[in-house]
Image: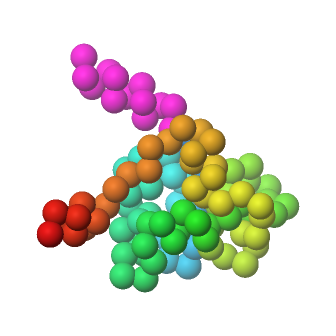
Amino acid sequence: MEKSIDKAVKMTFPMFWFDGNMYFKLIEVEEDLEELFKAYEGYMTPDEILDKAKNAVGSTIERNFGLRIEHRGDTTLREFLVSKNVKIPRIKEEVKNEKE
């Protein structure tokens, strides 16, 4: 039963394209978002990514967020995810630091 619930949750994830110098991919599920955060580990925190990544202006891709020069729209990645009721995943390293 749990697997069917997980599958239903993953199906409702709001897919979007992410474009940055260190990572570019269609983000389809929460695990992809975690992978994005890990790609920037040591360079940017997940919070920095969420707040600095913006939508692309004039893109042919509807949901296009990233850190490149064309990503200068009014909506941050965090605002987009919150508007879609996405729970922001926490990176294991952050959880580890909180326990110390």
- Name which residue lies at 51% across and 71% down: 48
The answer to which quarter of the image holds residue 3 is top left
- Give the number of marks: 0
- In this view, the residue in front, 35 or 87, is 87
Viewer can see residue 19 = no
* Image coordinates for residue 87, horizontal then vertical, percent: 44, 44
The answer to which quarter of the image holds residue 90 is bottom left
Image: magenta residue range: 1-13
Viewer can see residue 23 = yes
Considering every residue shown, the one lying at the far bottom of the view is 43
- Name which residue lies at 63% across and 52% down: 79
- Name which residue lies at 36% across and 68% down: 38
- In this view, the residue in front, 87 or 70, is 87
- Name the image quarter holding the N terminus: top left
Compared to residue 77, the image places residue 30 above or below, namely: above
* Image coordinates for residue 8, horizontal then vertical, percent: 42, 25
The answer to which quarter of the image holds residue 82 is top right
